[in-house]
Image (spheres, rainbow, N blue to C red):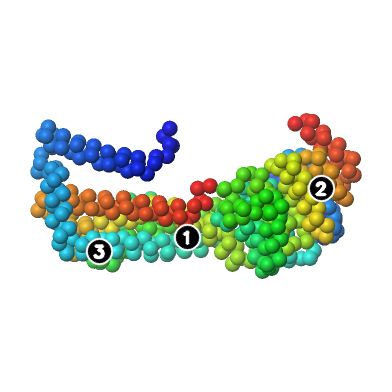
Amino acid sequence: MIEFHDTTISLSHDGRRRLSIGFRLSKGDLTVLLGANGSGKTTILDLIAGARKPDTGTVTTEPAGLPVAYAVQDSSSGLLPWRTILSNILLPSVVANRCSEQNRSEALRLLEQFGLAERRQDFPYQLSEGEKQIVNLIRAVCTPAEILLLDEPFSSLNSRTRALAKEKLLQFASNRTTILVTHDPTDLEMPFNRFLRIADSSVEEVDSKEATSFLRNAVSET
Amino acid sequence: MPSQKLKPATRALCIAAGICALIAAWYLALSLRWVSTLLLPPPPDVARSLARMAQTASFWHDVGSTVGTWLAGVIVGTAVGGAFGFLLALNPYIWAAVEPWVEFLRSLPSVVLVPLVSVLLGVGANSRFACAALVVAVLMMASAATAIRATRSSHLRLAIAWRASFLRTLVSFYFPATLSHLAVALRAAIPLALIVTVAADMLIATDAGLGRILMDALAVFDTKKLYAGVIVVGVLGYLAAGLSAILERKTIHWSGS
């Protein structure tokens, strides 16, 4: 569960741009978060992850104290350069003291499915941007967490890998609270049940038609 | 074109050609009488002087003394400076108080520390070691602190999201990030420590060390021995720089990414 209660946060150093947030997501919700560039999508994910503190109001996550799975937007900076691919994927489990053989075989199985099994002992600098993004995604789904945050997780993937990534993500998202940030209208083909949009410095709930229309307009404007 | 990587054999050939060119210029300067042989003895005389020195036990004692002090200074300075910089920079308030002193010491020409340390610790091997360790420690402190501040915010966001403990964040995030900065700083620290060790040999007038050979040669105006001593110090510095580069490539190969 994720709940924002009367939450506000500044989006600029001078405090002139503020974002008001108030929504509640339950376990099993598959949510897409939309908004223009710089509107505060990543800030919302950071608030949920605990990486930023709100200026006012509260952010509650349940179960409290458990790790939050987070695939950050910049996949290059999300991976630790001194760790191998497999070690990067297993790190959240190690941090949570929940690294098991099952964890390891799950990671290896996913690497195999994405054609990266042979690269498991490579280091991030040896991978392409798309491969790094896959590793980020695999790490997120392998994190022992009930909250899954995905910041534009498919942006560097080709169409075939993207389809596979979406399929795998849906398998892992079924019993978690998931938020996915995207600018791509094709991502809305996934069975989201919640649609959040940032507009006029606040977060509002919209339906799938409005979400699709927002992204299509955004694409046509660019 | 300037970034073109040479094959090892080609590179070795270029190095040999560079040495030959220098020796040829040396001979040319002497044959055209640009420099007196008293000030610049012919290469074979210097080579003979070096060979004679190498046959004496005292020469190897001097080399051992300088190299031992130099290495001990690098190891102790790296460990102490790296650890202090790492721990102090974790707290921004403490680091703000310490940073001006570190920067002040770092800005001083390193040789200036030699008379200062000898005043505090007296003349002898301890002062020489302290000088080498101090210049390395200051460099490493600044470098470790820079690493802490430069640790990517994206990595720390993940550490927080995964609910990593403070100790885990130190071990898994800050410490490896600091290592790469320290390895880069070590490449600067190794030659700097050699300069200070040899300068301390000369200025503190210790009873052993390569600096002492240079000072003794200068005192009796034995220029052949002086050049031979300079060549030994230069070769040591060159080998150390090469070794530290190899060490950096092997241990933190990912840092160049």
Measured from the top left, where is residue A167 in percent x and y?
79, 50
In terms of depth relative to the viewer, which is nearer, A217 or B203? Answer: A217
Identify the mark nearer the N-term, 3 or 1.
Answer: 3
Q: Secondary structure at mark 2?
A: strand
Measured from the top left, where is residue A193 in percent x and y?
88, 50
Residue found at the very far top of the displayed protein: A221
Q: Secondary structure at mark 1?
A: helix
The amino acid type found where label 2 is placed reads: Val
Chain of the residue on which disc 2 is drawn: A
In the image, taking residue B37 as reference, residue B175 lies left or right, namely right
Can you identify the residue that label 2 sits on?
A32
Q: Residues within 10 Å of mark 2 (few under 14, many from 20)?
A: many
**Mark count:** 3
Marks 3, 2 in one chain: no
Q: State which mark lies toward you, 2 or 1.
A: 2
Instruction: Tell me, for residue B85, which label it has, or none.
Output: 1
Chain of the residue on which disc 3 is drawn: B
Measured from the top left, where is residue B249 in percent x and y?
45, 52
Q: Secondary structure at mark 3?
A: helix
Q: Residues within 10 Å of mark 1 (few under 14, many from 20)?
A: many
Residue A220 showing in the rendered view: yes
Q: Going 69% across and 54% down the picture, which residue do you hit?
A: A112
**Up/down of B8 relative to A61, above or below:** above
* Quadrant of the rendering where the N terminus of chain B is positioned: top left
Residue B106 showing in the rendered view: no
Marks 3/2: CA distance? Answer: 68 Å
Q: Going 29% across and 63% down the picture, which residue do you hit?
A: B69
Q: Going 75% across and 49% down the picture, which residue do you hit?
A: A165
Can you identify the residue that label 3 sits on?
B65
